[in-house]
Image (tube, rainbow, N blue to C red):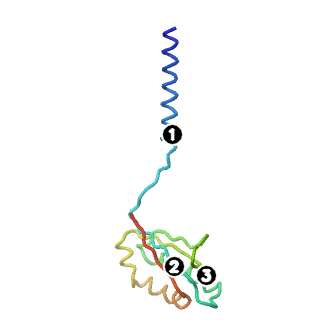
Protein backbone atom coordinates (compact mmCIF):
# COMPACT_ATOMS: atom_id res chain seq x y z
CA UNK A 1 0.00 0.00 0.00
CA UNK A 2 2.84 2.40 0.86
CA UNK A 3 4.62 1.56 -2.36
CA UNK A 4 1.45 2.28 -4.37
CA UNK A 5 1.00 5.60 -2.56
CA UNK A 6 4.64 6.55 -3.29
CA UNK A 7 4.22 5.71 -6.98
CA UNK A 8 1.02 7.81 -7.16
CA UNK A 9 2.77 10.72 -5.45
CA UNK A 10 5.72 10.43 -7.83
CA UNK A 11 3.39 10.42 -10.84
CA UNK A 12 1.51 13.43 -9.44
CA UNK A 13 4.80 15.27 -8.90
CA UNK A 14 5.88 14.55 -12.48
CA UNK A 15 2.52 15.78 -13.83
CA UNK A 16 2.70 18.98 -11.76
CA UNK A 17 6.27 19.59 -12.91
CA UNK A 18 5.30 18.94 -16.53
CA UNK A 19 2.36 21.34 -16.26
CA UNK A 20 4.57 23.99 -14.70
CA UNK A 21 7.20 23.48 -17.39
CA UNK A 22 4.59 23.71 -20.13
CA UNK A 23 3.44 27.01 -18.65
CA UNK A 24 6.98 28.35 -18.79
CA UNK A 25 7.39 27.18 -22.36
CA UNK A 26 4.12 28.83 -23.36
CA UNK A 27 5.25 32.27 -22.19
CA UNK A 28 5.70 34.78 -24.97
CA UNK A 29 9.30 35.60 -25.77
CA UNK A 30 10.06 39.16 -26.81
CA UNK A 31 13.04 41.37 -27.32
CA UNK A 32 13.97 44.95 -26.50
CA UNK A 33 16.01 46.01 -29.53
CA UNK A 34 18.26 49.05 -29.53
CA UNK A 35 17.03 50.16 -32.94
CA UNK A 36 14.88 53.31 -33.16
CA UNK A 37 11.32 53.35 -34.41
CA UNK A 38 10.47 56.64 -36.17
CA UNK A 39 6.68 56.93 -36.35
CA UNK A 40 5.24 59.67 -38.55
CA UNK A 41 1.57 60.64 -38.56
CA UNK A 42 0.51 62.98 -41.34
CA UNK A 43 -2.39 64.94 -42.78
CA UNK A 44 -2.20 65.80 -46.45
CA UNK A 45 -3.06 69.20 -47.91
CA UNK A 46 -6.54 69.76 -49.23
CA UNK A 47 -6.73 68.53 -52.83
CA UNK A 48 -3.87 66.03 -52.55
CA UNK A 49 -4.60 63.14 -54.90
CA UNK A 50 -4.27 59.43 -54.10
CA UNK A 51 -1.49 59.30 -56.72
CA UNK A 52 0.47 62.01 -54.88
CA UNK A 53 0.03 60.16 -51.57
CA UNK A 54 1.21 56.94 -53.21
CA UNK A 55 4.25 58.76 -54.63
CA UNK A 56 5.13 60.09 -51.16
CA UNK A 57 4.83 56.65 -49.57
CA UNK A 58 6.72 55.03 -52.45
CA UNK A 59 9.35 57.68 -51.77
CA UNK A 60 9.79 56.32 -48.24
CA UNK A 61 10.67 52.97 -49.79
CA UNK A 62 13.12 54.57 -52.23
CA UNK A 63 14.68 56.53 -49.39
CA UNK A 64 15.10 53.35 -47.31
CA UNK A 65 16.89 51.72 -50.25
CA UNK A 66 19.23 54.72 -50.51
CA UNK A 67 19.94 55.26 -46.80
CA UNK A 68 21.78 52.34 -45.11
CA UNK A 69 20.71 53.34 -41.57
CA UNK A 70 17.08 52.37 -42.25
CA UNK A 71 16.42 48.71 -41.43
CA UNK A 72 12.66 48.36 -42.04
CA UNK A 73 9.66 50.40 -43.10
CA UNK A 74 5.90 50.12 -42.62
CA UNK A 75 3.72 51.98 -45.12
CA UNK A 76 0.16 50.66 -44.87
CA UNK A 77 -1.93 52.47 -42.28
CA UNK A 78 -4.54 50.28 -40.63
CA UNK A 79 -5.73 52.71 -37.97
CA UNK A 80 -4.50 56.26 -37.36
CA UNK A 81 -6.05 58.44 -34.68
CA UNK A 82 -6.06 62.17 -35.33
CA UNK A 83 -4.28 62.08 -38.72
CA UNK A 84 -5.08 60.62 -42.13
CA UNK A 85 -2.00 58.41 -42.58
CA UNK A 86 1.00 57.03 -40.72
CA UNK A 87 4.23 55.34 -41.71
CA UNK A 88 7.18 53.98 -39.77
CA UNK A 89 10.89 53.73 -40.37
CA UNK A 90 13.14 51.61 -38.19
CA UNK A 91 16.65 53.00 -37.83
CA UNK A 92 19.61 50.83 -36.86
CA UNK A 93 20.53 53.16 -33.99
CA UNK A 94 19.99 56.61 -32.52
CA UNK A 95 23.06 57.76 -34.45
CA UNK A 96 21.56 56.48 -37.71
CA UNK A 97 18.44 58.55 -37.00
CA UNK A 98 20.53 61.64 -36.24
CA UNK A 99 22.57 61.17 -39.43
CA UNK A 100 19.35 60.78 -41.46
CA UNK A 101 18.39 64.41 -40.75
CA UNK A 102 19.29 66.47 -43.82
CA UNK A 103 20.85 63.45 -45.52
CA UNK A 104 20.79 63.31 -49.32
CA UNK A 105 18.13 60.57 -49.16
CA UNK A 106 15.86 62.61 -46.90
CA UNK A 107 16.26 65.80 -48.93
CA UNK A 108 15.39 63.98 -52.17
CA UNK A 109 12.28 62.46 -50.58
CA UNK A 110 11.23 65.86 -49.20
CA UNK A 111 10.86 67.11 -52.79
CA UNK A 112 7.83 64.80 -53.14
CA UNK A 113 6.62 64.75 -49.54
CA UNK A 114 6.67 68.34 -48.27
CA UNK A 115 4.63 69.97 -51.06
CA UNK A 116 1.62 67.79 -50.16
CA UNK A 117 2.08 67.55 -46.36
CA UNK A 118 -0.30 69.74 -44.41
CA UNK A 119 0.85 68.72 -40.94
CA UNK A 120 2.84 65.87 -39.45
CA UNK A 121 4.06 64.66 -36.08
CA UNK A 122 7.01 62.36 -35.45
CA UNK A 123 7.59 60.03 -32.54
CA UNK A 124 11.00 58.39 -32.00
CA UNK A 125 11.03 55.35 -29.72
CA UNK A 126 13.78 53.00 -28.54
CA UNK A 127 14.85 50.92 -25.52
Q: Assign a secondary structure to mark 2.
A: helix
Q: Is residue 47 left or right of residue 22?
A: right
The percent position of residue 112, horizontal first and vertical second, equals: 53, 88
- The answer to whether the residues at label 2 and label 1 have Cβ atoms under 8 Å apart is no
Q: Secondary structure at mark 3?
A: helix
Give the residue furthest to the left: 95
Q: Are marks 1 and 3 in contact (CB under 8 Å)?
A: no
Residue 76 visible in the displayed image:
no
Q: Which residue in the structure is indicated by mark 2?
A: 62
Residue drawn where x is 48% and y is 36% of the image: 21
Label 3 sits on residue: 54
The percent position of residue 95, horizontal first and vertical second, equals: 34, 73
Viewer-nearest of discs 2 and 1: 1
Residue at 49% in and 35% down: 20
As drawn, 119 above or below 124 = below
Within-10-Å neighbours for mark 1: few <14, some 14–19, many 20+ = few
Label 2 and label 1: CA atoms lie apart by: 45 Å
Q: Is residue 15 above or below residue 112?
A: above
Q: Quadrant of the C terminus?
A: bottom left
Q: Residue furthest front?
A: 82
Mark 2 or mark 1, earlier in chain: 1
Observer-side mark, 1 or 3, equals 1
Q: Which mark is residue 23?
A: 1
Q: CA distance from mark 1 to mark 3?
A: 46 Å
In front of the other: 42 or 89 = 42
Label 3 packing within 10 angstroms: few (<14), some (14-19), many (20+): few
Amino acid sequence: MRKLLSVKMAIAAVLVAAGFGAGLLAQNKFGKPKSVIHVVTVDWKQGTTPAQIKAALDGVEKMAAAYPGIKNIWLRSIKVQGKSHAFVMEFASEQALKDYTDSKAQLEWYKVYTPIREESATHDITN
